[in-house]
Image (spheres, rainbow, N blue to C red):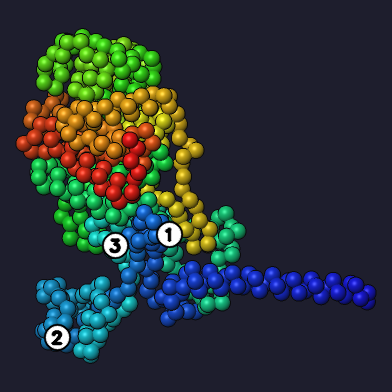
Amino acid sequence: MNPSSEKNRIRFIFFCFLFFALILVVRLYYVQIIHGQEYVDKADRQYVTPTSKIFDRGSIYFQNKDGSLLSAASLTTGYELAINPQKITDQASVYKSLSEVIPLDVESFYQKAGQKDSVYQKIADHVSEDIMKKVEALNIPGLQIQKERWCYYPGDSLAAQTLGFVGYDGNNLVGRYGLEKYYEDVLSRDSNQAYVNFFAEIFSNIKQVISTDSKMEGKIVTSIEPTVEGFLEKKLGEVQDKYSSALTGGIIIDPTTGEIYAMAVSPTYNLNKFSDEKNLSVFNNPLVEGLYEMGSIIKPLTMAAGIDSGAVTAETTYKDTGSLTLDGSTIYNYDKKARGTVNMQEVLNQSLNLGVSFVVRTMGKDNFANYMRGYGLDEETGIDLPGENHGRLENLKSPRDIEYATASFGQGISLTPIETVRALSALANGGKLITPHVVKRINYTSGLFNNISYVNEAKQVIKKETSEEISRMLTVVVDKALANGKVSLPNYSVAAKTGTAQIAKPGGGYYDDRWLHSFFGYFPSYKPRFLIFLYTVEPKGVPFASQTLTTPFMDTVKFLINYYNIAPDR
C-alpha cells in the first residue's frame, strides 16, 4: 500500500472522529447548559412513557430595560391529590384528617368519596411539596399523590390581557387568550412523546434543525418592560377608580419600530386565579378588539392629510362661525362658540370641529377618505394578539358631506385603539405605517432563534416633511394650549392632543351625558422614543379629556424620562 495513501486515510479517519467529537461537545453544551433544567425535570422519567401526560409548555418572558429577562409565564411543579373511593371506609375520619392539613370543600369531598364505582377522584391540585409531605405522613389508605405541572404567572395580573392564560379546551390544555393563544404552535409541546435517555437526547434535535416539516417549538421574549407595564397599570387604575369609568386602557409603544413597552386595561384579573373570575368579558383585550369613536385625537390625522395634500398650511385661515349645516344636519365647536378668523394652528390648539371640517372641504372629501384609508384605519394592524378587529369607515363611502365633516373630528367612524395608535405613530416617525407587535424574539428549542422586526416593511403614508410639521404644531399645543401651557416641560419637547367623543346610542344618535376621553402624545417631538395612548370610557362627572387624562399622561412622560434617562432635547 502506498504510504501516502495510508497517511491520507489516517487523516480522514482522524478528522471524522474530530468532527464527531465536535458535534458531541456542542450537543452536550446544548443539553446541559441551555436546557439543563428541563432535563433535571425529566430525570425521573427516562426511558419510559408516563402513565399520565406530563404537562409541558414553553415560557414567556418580559424584557427589562437592560435587556435581562423576567419570567412572565412559566411552569411550576406541585402535586395532585386523589382518593380511591373503594378504599375509603370511614369518610368522616378521612375528611377530618385531610381538612386539618389542606382546605377541602366538605360537600365535594363526600360526593367524590361516595363514587364507589370509581377508583380515582381528584380532591385537590396545585398542592405544594410542604403540604404534600404532611398529607403523605397521614398514611391514609386509598389516598393517591401524583406530581403535576401547570402554568404559573409570577406577575399575577401584570399584563393579563396581553399574556392570556392556559386553560382547557375540551380535554386539552391550550392557550385561551393573548400571547398564549396566538403563539400556541410555538409554546405547546407534544406531551405524548416518550422520554428517552440522556445520550439519545443529545442527538434528538438534529432532525428538527434540518427538517422543514418539524414543529418549531420554543420560548418567546416580549418587548413588554415590566416596570413600565406596572406603572401604566397603576395610572390606569387611578383613573378608573377616580372617575368610576366603565373601562380604561392604555398603550406605550416605540412609534418607529412598533415594539410595545406596555399595554393594559382596567379592570383586569389575576392570571393565576382566572377560574374564579365571574366576569368572563375581562379576559378579552379591548385594545385590539374594541371599536370606539375616538373623537378629537383624530384631528391631527385630518390636519396632516390637509398639509400633505397641499390643501392647507399651519398659517392657512378660515372664518369660524361656530356652526355649520351640511345635508340638513348642523355641527358645532365643542362650546358652540364662533372664533372668527383663525389659522390651522389654532384649530389644533382650541380643538375646533369646524376647523378640521374646513380642511376636508378644502382638500376634497374623496382625497380625505383616501388618506384615512391610507392610515390603515379600516384594516387590521397585524399585531401578534388574537381576535384583532378592524375599523369601520363605511361613512366615508357616503355621498353626504356631513359624514366626512364628522369623521374629520373622530365621530361617525369607529376604530380599535391599536389601529389608532398605529395611525398616530405615522405622525411621529416620519410618516411610516408600522406594524405594532409584542413579541421581540423567539428562542426555538433547536437552538435557533428569530428576532422580530418589521421596520423595513413600514409603508410611507405621509411625507417626512408633513410628519415634522404636524409634530411642531402638536408641540405648540402642549407648550401653549394644554392647561394653558402649565404642564409644558422646559427641557423636553412633547407633542400631544386630547380627544372627547360622544358615545353613540345603539339605535342611532348620541348620548348627551356619556363620553369617551382619549389622549395621545409622543416625545421627544422630533425624534420620539415613546408614544403614549390613553382612553377612558364613560368617566363620571367630567366632560373633557383634558380633565381626566392630562395628569396621568404627563406623569407617564416624566416617569419614562427618568426611568430611561432621556436626554433633554431643548
Image: 269 above or below 512 = below
Callout 1: 10 Å neighbours few (<14), some, many (20+)? Answer: many
- In the image, what residue occupies the spot 22% across and 24% down? 349
Q: CB under 8 Å between callouts 2 and 3? A: no
Pointer 1 residue = 219
Q: Position of residue 354 (x, y in %)?
A: 20, 16
Say which label, 2 or 3, has the lower sequence index.
2
- In the image, what residue occupies the spot 16% across and 49% down? 237
Residue 97, disc:
2
The N terminus appears in which quarter of the rendering? Answer: bottom right
Say which label, 2 or 1, has the lower sequence index.
2
- Depth check, mark 2 against mark 1: the one in front is 1
- CA separation, marks 1 and 3? 15 Å
Q: How many marks?
A: 3
Image: 162 above or below 206 = above
Q: Position of residue 58 (x, y in %)?
A: 40, 62
Residue 153, disc:
3
Callout 2: SS: helix
Residue 415 lies in what quarter of the image?
top left
Say which label, 1 or 3, has the lower sequence index.
3
- CA separation, marks 2 and 1? 42 Å
For the residue pair 262 and 36, the one nearer the viewer reads as: 262
Which residue type does callout 3 highlight? Tyr
- In the image, what residue occupies the spot 36% across and 54% down? 65
Q: Is 323 displayed left or right of 48 in the figure?
A: left
Which residue type does callout 2 highlight? Ser
- In the image, what residue occupies the spot 33% across and 35% down? 570
Is residue 382 visible in the rendered structure shown here?
A: no
Q: Is 9 displayed left or right of 460 in the figure?
A: right
Callout 1: SS: strand
- Depth check, mark 2 against mark 3: the one in front is 3
Residue 108 lies in what quarter of the image?
bottom left
